[in-house]
Image (cartoon, rainbow, N blue to C red):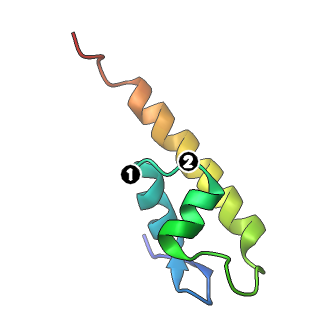
Amino acid sequence: MRAMYICMCNAVTDHAIRRAAAEGVESFSELQARTGCSDCCGACESEARQCLREAVAETRSVLSFLPTPA
């Protein structure tokens, strides 16, 4: 699957956002701190937020299938 640039100013792709979510990032401010996404012109903010929401939801659904430690 090809990466799609979400934030052109800082070269942040949808893959980078998904990776950040998989590593525990759940808030937009955390995403900005980690990637710099949407800290310049802000044109990508709504798309970046949506991508993060979807990635966090996907990560949570995957984690719900894992067995809990005994």
Q: Residue at x 46, y 41 (%)?
A: 59
- Report the residue marked by disc 2: 26
The number of numbered discs placed on residues in the rendered structure image is: 2
Question: Is 10 situated above or below 17?
Answer: below
List x then y, in percent, for residue 68.
Answer: 30, 16
Amino acid on which disc 1 is placed: Glu
Classed neighbour count for the residue bearing mark 2: other residues with Cα under 10 Å, few (<14), some (14–19), many (≥20): some
User: Residue 9 occupies which quadrant of the picture?
Assistant: bottom right
List x then y, in percent, for residue 33.
Answer: 54, 68
Q: Nearer the viewer, residue 39 or 17?
A: 39
Disc 2 element? loop
- Image quarter where the C terminus lies is top left
Q: Residue at x 67, y 76 (%)?
A: 38
Amino acid on which disc 2 is placed: Glu
Disc 1 element? loop
Residue 16 placement, left or right of 9 = left
- Report the residue marked by disc 1: 23
Question: Is 47 situated above or below 68?
Answer: below
Q: Can you name the residue that lies furthest to the top here?
A: 70
Q: Residue at x 43, y 25 (%)?
A: 64
- Image quarter where the N terminus lies is bottom left
List x then y, in percent, for residue 66.
Answer: 32, 25
Q: Residue at x 45, y 76 (%)?
A: 2
- Separation of disc 2 and disc 1 at Cα? 9 Å
Classed neighbour count for the residue bearing mark 1: other residues with Cα under 10 Å, few (<14), some (14–19), many (≥20): few
Residue 32 placement, left or right of 2 = right
Q: Can you name the residue that lies furthest to the left here?
A: 70
